[in-house]
Image (cartoon, grey):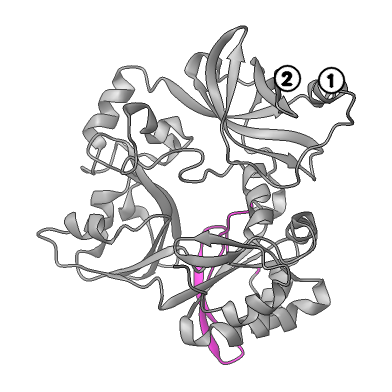
Amino acid sequence: MSVGTAFHKRTAPLNRKMVWREWAGYFAAGTFADAPDIEYNAIREVAALIDVSPLFKYEVTGPDALRLIDRIITRDATKLAVGHVYYTPWCDEQGKVLDDGTITRLEEDRFRWTAADPSLRWFRMNAAGLDVEVRETTEATAALALQGPASRDVLEAATGESFADLRYFRARSAKVGRVPVDVTRTGYTGDLGYEVWVGEGQAVPLWDALMKAGAAFGIRPAGILALDVARVEAGLIMIEADYTSSRHAMIPEQSYSPFEIGLGRLTSFDKGGFVGKRALVAEQRAGGPPRRLVGLEIGWEGIERMFASQGLPPAVSPIASREPFPLFAGRKRVGRVTSSTWSPTLKQMIALASVPAAHAEPGTELDAEWTVEARRGTVPATVVSLPFFDPPRKRA
């Protein structure tokens, strides 16, 4: 049974159409506006406030907290300074990704770790012999993503202090009115943005303060349908859509190494041992994995032809799809689209896809299966570099 987050007292009255999705056992607003593209425009043009409290959250503390994290993740945790944030995957013993998330070093021996799936048992299993405590704080900690070009203006108006010096993937404490918060320069939209972390008892006052401060900038609450479009544009992967956690894989093909889902850059072989390192080293020595994550631009002319063949005008949904569909090279199936969306900013149908390494070079021409009123056909698709959308303000 799903329950409301700590912000439900505010989000429920705003969700007049009762468009809810389930996210890790919580109610998550699909959209507040009449259409998700209104909220998408807030993300890309002004500022949007998104409830991301359903993320699983863990506090890792103690003298060996850093050792535990370095033992699990693929990145070199010893380089994670206080006030910095890592985005990282972590793997099983076969080098297959279990999950991906962020780790914030709040103090020398205190970290906040987020995950998409429940991870407490895995973290504690790997803590054997270490002086460390891992505590789940999912319910105790609420979180809001404040995203968009005006997000810094809103945050500064709400806190009364400058955030111009808070760099990308950095963190610091602040106060919104009398509410103590942690602010990280992170997000899932590929835009300028922040995530604000607060104790669940102070969630409603935080929401009210940010909405009040943002009124002058055109802030809007946004649901996960708009967020999904933005994250595909940013080339950001989603568990159980663009890859399957090895914990849930039913067959070998459903397990992915970091190098198969665009996270090889976050894998360090220079650090000490970590779970899955031996398997990943062997994979690289063998020439790398057989699959790669790529971006695709799907040709609009092909979509038009598909509709015209049935005497229909072209139409695509404003909602991103997480349903896979096949890719072909000639008549041979060579991969699959994992997430796709119409990009309002780029005016282009785009997708994330898993393809063989031989078809992963930008410029490679493929064909994507497309269905119009139950009739299947194919449309041209071109492999492109990720991300699709990467504005300078994201890191400014």
Q: How many marks?
A: 2
User: Does residue 278 sit above or below 25 in this rendering?
Assistant: above
Is residue 296 found left or right of 254 in the rendered image? right
**Dividing the image into 4 quarters, which one contains the N terminus?**
bottom left
* Magenta span: 164-189
Identity of the residue drawn at 32% across and 28% down: 252
Magenta region includes residue 169 = yes
Q: Nearer the viewer, residue 221 or 313?
A: 313
Q: Nearer the viewer, residue 155 or 188?
A: 188
Residue beneath disc 1: 305
Identity of the residue drawn at 65% across and 60% down: 30
Identity of the residue drawn at 68% across and 48% down: 229
The numbered mark, 1 or 2, whose residue comes first in the sequence reads 1
Q: Position of residue 287 (x, y in %)?
A: 36, 17
Residue beneath disc 2: 379
Q: Position of residue 315 (x, y in %)?
A: 82, 36
Q: Are marks 1 and 2 in contact (CB under 8 Å)?
A: yes
Magenta region includes residue 212 = no
Is residue 32 found left or right of 55 in the rendered image? right
Which of the 4 quarters of the picture holds residue 327? Answer: top right
